[in-house]
Image (tube, rainbow, N blue to C red):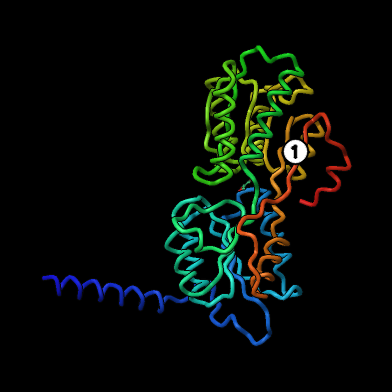
């Protein structure tokens, strides 16, 4: 009996290895190692859900370009973790030199990253973090301090309500939440919830899962407003969700932006169009989330390539812009 179980297990493992080895790469790239000295990088990107994400992809593509010594294999996972698994396994099969992963959520990465590790391929995590049992299975992480972003937003709101002499008023907050389980969501939501806890007069009137997209946020906010329009603040976990909220508020002729005596809108990312909206007084606060990871990833790869040990964690520099201080120069300087 015991022998049979061992035999079945062995057969299953052999079959699994054979199936993996025989799977044809979907991107059709079989021979990635031409004799041209380029460093081959497989990049598994979350998707293209937001303007931030598009800028992020561009930054990686610009830095890991052929002129800069790279062959980049880019994979868009369309917001699905199983697509990221497939992409990473394909990169392993193709024998890339490095894998760069922008994980959709924090969990579920132990096996696939370990597989890359066993194949001897260094893994660099960008943007959101991964929660794995053994942090040694990946080399470095580069991204935002999402918790600090949330803290900054809440400190600003507290001060702004004081400046508006509304610190004693009941403040009703609507929350547009990003992809559940993504570091950006966990941290930004966490800071909001802590602040609501700490202020007796602040109430969370609803949390809507806007998936970081304008379309979903528009749809959900509209639905919400049919039942409740008594809102003082909307906390949007990215700019595209803020754009969706603004469209929904327009539909209900609800004014927004403190300059207009309307609902206070707080947003994360600070892409150019959001900064424009801030300048026009439609968004009150843009908390910056910097997508320009490309040069940092390039630097990490160059360090690894020359046998150095890059820092395990690297936070990118970020700021915030409110309707009170935003200037034309800030907007003009924004490239994305
Ligand atoms: O993980 C970063 C977040 O993901 C950005 O705030 C958002 O726009 C993106 O989709």
Picture quadrant where residue 200 is located: top right
Picture residue at 63% right of the left edge, 28% below the top: 234
Taking the view exactly as shown, the residue that stands out farthest to the right is 329
Depth order, front residue of 251/216? 216
x, y percent for residue 251: 65, 27
Which class describes the residues within 10 Å of circle 1: few (<14), some (14-19), or many (20+)? some
Secondary-structure class at tag 1: strand
Depth order, front residue of 197/44? 197
Q: How many marks?
A: 1
Q: Compared with residue 44, is residue 264 higher up or lower down, i.e. above or below?
A: above
x, y percent for residue 296: 70, 60
Picture residue at 51% right of the left edge, 62% below the top: 136
Picture residue at 60% right of the left edge, 49% below the top: 49
Instruction: Please indicate whether residue 63 sits to the left or right of residue 234 in the image.
Output: right
Taking the view exactly as shown, the residue that stands out farthest to the bottom is 35
Q: Quadrant of the N terminus?
A: bottom left
Q: Is label 1's Cβ within 8 Å of ligand 1?
A: no
Q: Compared with residue 169, is residue 308 higher up or lower down, i.e. above or below?
A: below
Picture quadrant where residue 310 is located: bottom right
Picture residue at 65% right of the left edge, 27% below the top: 249
Depth order, front residue of 40/210? 40
Depth order, front residue of 218/231? 231
Picture quadrant where residue 17 is located: bottom left
x, y percent for residue 278: 78, 34
For mark 1, what is the residue?
320
Q: Compared with residue 45, is residue 250 higher up or lower down, i.e. above or below?
A: above
């Amino acid at each position: 009996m015991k022998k049979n179980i061992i035999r079945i297990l062995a057969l299953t493992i052999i079959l699994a290895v054979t199936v993996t080895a025989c799977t044809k790469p979907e991107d059709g790239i079989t021979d990635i190692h031409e004799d041209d000295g380029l460093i081959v990088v497989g990049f598994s990107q979350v998707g293209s859900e937001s303007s931030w994400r598009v800028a992020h992809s561009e930054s990686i593509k610009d830095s890991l370009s052929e002129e800069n010594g790279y062959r980049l294999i880019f994979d868009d996972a369309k917001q699905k973790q199983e697509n990221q698994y497939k992409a990473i396994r394909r990169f392993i099969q193709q024998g890339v030199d490095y894998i760069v992963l922008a994980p959709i959520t924090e969990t579920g990465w132990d096996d696939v990253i370990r597989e890359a590790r066993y194949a001897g391929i260094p893994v660099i995590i960008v943007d959101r973090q991964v929660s794995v049992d053994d942090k040694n299975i990946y080399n470095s992480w580069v991204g935002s301090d999402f918790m600090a972003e949330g803290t900054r937003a809440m400190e600003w709101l507290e001060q702004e309500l004081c400046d508006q002499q509304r610190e004693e008023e009941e403040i009703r907050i609507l929350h547009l939440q990003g992809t559940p389980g993504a570091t950006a969501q966990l941290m930004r939501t966490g800071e909001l919830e802590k602040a609501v806890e700490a202020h007796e007069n602040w109430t969370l009137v609803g949390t809507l899962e806007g998936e970081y997209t304008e379309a979903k946020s528009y749809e959900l906010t509209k639905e919400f407003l049919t039942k409740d329009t008594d809102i003082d603040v909307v906390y949007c976990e990215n700019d595209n969700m803020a754009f969706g909220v603004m469209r929904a508020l327009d539909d209900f002729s609800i004014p927004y932006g403190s300059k207009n005596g309307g609902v206070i809108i707080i947003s994360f990312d600070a892409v150019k169009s959001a900064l424009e909206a801030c300048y026009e007084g439609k968004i009150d606060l843009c908390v910056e989330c910097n997508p320009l990871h490309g040069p940092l990833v390039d630097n990490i790869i160059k360090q690894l390539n020359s046998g150095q040990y890059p820092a395990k964690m690297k936070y990118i520099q970020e700021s915030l812009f409110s309707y009170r201080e935003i200037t034309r120069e800030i907007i003009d300087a924004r490239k994305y």
